[in-house]
Image (cartoon, helix red, strand yellow):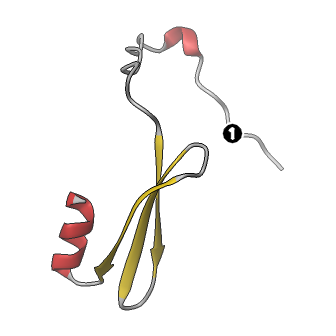
Amino acid sequence: MSRMPHPDPAGQPDQPDPEPDLEEVILGVDTHKDIHVAAIITTLGAELADATFPTTAAGYRRLLAW
């Protein structure tokens, strides 16, 4: 199995530190034929929110806005 090369971090521009009061979250989307179910959890697995969206143009726009 081949390995992907990683860029040299020394050549990367400095990244600003994330806001200290912001918490990292994970967004997952379970896709189906007629609906998509989205959930947001913390890095420790606690659920923060979930929502269901239809698989229509309007539903995709609502999912992106959510």
Name above or below for residue 52 compared with residue 24.
below
From the viewer's perspective, tell me whether residue 2 is left or right of residue 32.
Answer: right
Which residue ends up furthest to the left in the rendered image? 58
Mark 1 surroundings: few (<14), some (14-19) or many (≥20) residues within 10 A: few
* Secondary element at image label 1: loop
Q: Residue at x 76, y 40 (%)?
A: 3
From the viewer's perspective, tell me whether residue 20 is left or right of residue 63.
Answer: right
Name above or below for residue 15 compared with residue 24.
above
Q: Residue at x 23, y 84 (%)?
A: 56
Which residue ends up furthest to the bottom in the rendered image? 34
- Of residues 47 and 40, the one nearer the viewer is 47
Q: Residue at x 18, y 79 (%)?
A: 57
Q: Quadrant of the C terminus?
A: bottom left
Name above or below for residue 35 compared with residue 44.
below
Where does the image place residue 25, in percent across and percent down from the top left?
46, 44
Q: Residue at x 57, y 43 (%)?
A: 43
Where does the image place residue 60, in percent across and percent down from the top left?
24, 72
Which residue type does callout 1 highlight?
Answer: Met
Where does the image place residue 21, in percent across and percent down from the top left?
38, 23
Q: Quadrant of residue 8?
A: top right
Q: Quadrant of residue 62?
A: bottom left
Residue linked to disc 1: 4
Where does the image place residue 63, in percent across and percent down from the top left?
27, 67
Which residue ends up furthest to the right in the rendered image? 1
Q: Quadrant of residue 14?
A: top left
Count of number-bearing discs: 1
From the viewer's perspective, tell me whether residue 64 is left or right of residue 14.
Answer: left
